[in-house]
Image (cartoon, rainbow, N blue to C red):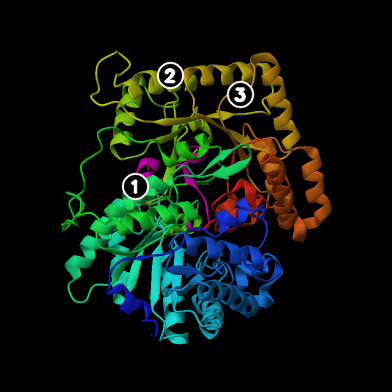
Amino acid sequence: MEKPTLLERLTQGPLLADGAMGTMLYARGFSFDRCYEALNVEAPEVVLEIHRAYLQAGAELLETNTFGANRYRLAEHGLEDRVAALNRAGVALARQAAREVNRPVWIAGSVGPLGVPLAPLGRVRAVEAREAFREQIAALAEAGVDALILETFSSLPEIQEAIRAAQETAPHLPIIAEMTFAQDGHTLMGHTPEEVVETLLGLGVPIIGANCSVGPAKLLPVIRRMASRVAEAGGPPPYLVVMPNAGWPEMAAGRLRYPATPDYFAEHAQRFLALGVRILGGCCGTTPEHIAAMRRALEARAEPLAGDRPPIFRGVSPPAPAEPEPTDLARRLRAGLFVISVEVDPPRGHDASALLEVARSLKAGGVDALNIADSPMARLRMSPWALAFLVQNHVGMETILHFPTRGRNLLRIQSDLLAIHALGVRNLFVVMGDPPAQGDYPEATDAMDIVPSGLVRLIKERFNAGLDHAGESIGRPTAFFVGVALNFNAPDPAREIKALRRKIRAGADFIMTQPVYEPAALKDFLRRYEEEEGPIPIPILAGVLPLMSLRHAEFLHNEVPGIRVPEAIRERLRRAGEERARWEGLRMAQEAVAELVEFTQGIYVMPPMGRYELVFQLMEAIPPHRRPGRASHLD
């Protein structure tokens, strides 16, 4: 009997997809810097073995090992001319595995994001993106897939280009469209589940849902909101699909591991089914054991669990959680993951729209948090609180708010902290602040009641315990995650060591340094600190400020307190000449990043003169193994 189409099969009930391919290849000794799609021809027996394992576990839908087989991702490995060959090979392996079992199996051609930011910040125009998707999709369709799965997209504009390319190139193939969501229930570009549903419904996509990024518990409310919006829309609803990660990744003994067990997945499978999900599967960290557990859950389907039926949302915000959760920055640092933070200055006026677009692009490119300066160089700008609030609520990206002690008395500091917490800002960078004498309003007060280490202690020991400075209750405790500054080039290193010791003892959670031009200088400071005080127990994010010219370097060295540009660095800029100085500055910054990743837990990028595109060029110097889940798709 002829196999029904995928959509016909879904009318009969839920269908089980496979789990991670990248996780299984990694477990077999293939490092993340390999091109996993090239293994379709370099190690086909390994890919075939993984497909077989998922089929034995009970999967009915196999994804091809082609997630990154587009011209842009393959170009990172010099394989951009092999798009068609690698996609066809991936389909052939999945089809071979399917022929070996005596039951229907559907093959979904996997298509992931291009791996490069699209215009306006990126270099790839929409028309170029669509052409790249067409090239990959044409090869998958010609090789005989039953469907296309567009997965792990964080940008709605990018997945729209992929969908249009699929509809133009292979209109006969059903599309499974999956966006990826962060801990806050938004995509990495800040889109809500409702916005995703609205967009995909408008494009006529028959199967929509979510995958990757977080575990089942975090995707459950996302799918509930999607189901609710689908129900509100009326008409023939699309089918829902969910493929979570096996929890939040952790590094253990130099290996990446995911904590969620197969039994945990099986429990949540029942909850997803109760919400109407028709395709269940797994993403990063899942294995055949997870799929087998979900197969058992499918075969022992229970009645929908109370409370899991999709409610109809009316735009009312959910109540605040009983206890605040750790910030995403805190989770990443505590998990030992490498963090990338980028500094932005608030606008000079009241329009933040341009900066919000910058934030969306930075987030889509893999940046973890946006550092928001407070009146940098003591010049008038929008309140950083407002920008932090806008970024977190309109982009869905965490911020690190600079919180200077200079110019604030103790009463104002405490009221400011309460206001900031009420706005949802949790990550603070406590600093002294720039003296007003150097800015636009030199007559402004320079008074302060508390030094940075004292403010850290006030926040960690009082506010985070539900008390103010006087010991009076402030109601529920705050949940601030506090960073402090380090000037490793200070003229009096002994004094800087004592200041850092006080900040750490006060409860600081992480450190951000002044710009590093010679990593050896930072190493020397850390070595001296360890000799006198013991190892630094909290993570360090190293400052990186690329130099644009010799004049830029001389200005920073001679006029900006706390920044030292060594003579050897300035000499390289002199030798490069005026026309090549910018490229030499970028090259030196990339060299510094390549060294810093070996002994720090992140970088704090300060793009000069608003040159945010330099961030992505600096990220190229970070080895893939230091950016799990970002540098490549680890499904």
Residue 307 seen in this snapshot:
yes
Q: How would you rate the neighbour count of disc 3 (Cα within 10 Å): few for under 14, some for 14-19, many for 20 or more?
A: some
Q: How would you rate the neighbour count of disc 1 (Cα within 10 Å): few for under 14, some for 14-19, many for 20 or more?
A: some
Answer whether labels 2 and 1 touch (C-beta < 8 Å). Answer: no
Q: Earlier in the sequence, mark 2 or mark 1?
A: 1
Magenta residues span 364-390
Q: Which of 447/469 is in front?
A: 469
User: Which residue bears the numbered disc 1?
Assistant: 217
What SS does tag 2 mark? Answer: helix
Mark pair 1, 3: CA separation: 34 Å
Mark pair 2, 1: CA separation: 34 Å
- Amino acid of disc 1: Ala
Q: Which mark is residue 536?
A: 3
Figure quadrant of residue 93: bottom right
Q: Is residue 368 magenta?
A: yes
Q: Earlier in the sequence, mark 2 or mark 3?
A: 2
Answer whether labels 2 and 3 touch (C-beta < 8 Å). Answer: no
Q: Which one is in front in this view, the residue at disc 2 or the one at disc 1?
A: 1
Q: Is residue 333 magenta?
A: no
- Amino acid of disc 2: Arg
- Amino acid of disc 3: Ile
What SS does tag 3 mark? Answer: loop
Relative vertical location of residue 478 with respect to residue 87 in this rendering, above or below: above
